[in-house]
Image: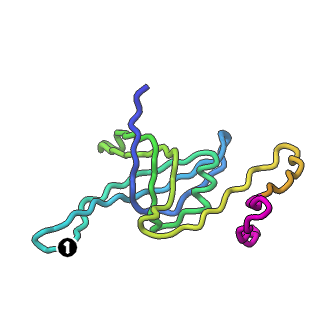
Amino acid sequence: MNETLVCAVGNVATQPVYRELAAGPSARFRLAVTSRYWDREKNTWTDGHTNFFTVWANRQLATNAAASLSVGDPVVVQGRLKVRTESREGQQWTSADIDAVAIGHDLARGTAAFRRAGRPDTAAPAPPCPEPDWETPRESPGTPARQQPEPVTVP
């Protein structure tokens, strides 16, 4: 089956709408993608045409997108493009949707602090594993020992 995979870089235009459906979580938001070009006559960057896409996310991606995205956030969206044409009240309407596979903040335009999402507890917790020995082994007797790094504690 042939699918049109796209990668769109733009800004979140509407607050994500999150829904719990029978098939699992779903979220959608509008993505504004504006082309920019260098105008040699004005010697400045100029905005071109803006395309709007409705981005659909499902399952864990929907939950994480709804919790992470706000209007104006610069994002990168990868997914399947679906262009639909329909008639409403005698007029032809065309919409472009992206069924998202991945969504992330655009780090070329800012910073982000990643937090791993907790998984639901469906099984009994695994027994704790012993902490691995991260120390560098010392040299053989008679050779000077290298200074060991300070241990790092992770909260």
Give the quadrant of the N terminus: top left
Magenta-colored stretch includes residue 154? yes
The quadrant where residue 137 appears: bottom right
Identify which residue, 35 or 149, lies in the foreground.
149
Note whether residue 16 is visible.
yes
Q: Is residue 150 magenta?
A: yes
Q: Position of residue 101 (x, y in %)?
A: 52, 44
Read off the magenta span. Answer: 134-155
Identify the amino acid type marked 1: Thr
- Quadrant location of the C terminus in the rendered image: bottom right
Question: What's the residue at 51%, 69% (across, down)?
Answer: 111
The residue depicted at 51 percent of the width and 57 percent of the height is 104
Coloring applied to the structure? rainbow
- Closer to the camera, 127 or 71? 127
Which quadrant of the view contains residue 93? top left
Judge whether 99 appears above or below 151 on screen.
above
Residue under the image location 40 percent in, 28 percent down: 2
Q: Which residue is mark 1?
A: 44
Residue at 61%, 56% (x, y): give it: 64
- Residue 54 is situated, as x and y percent measured from the top left of the image, at 44, 51
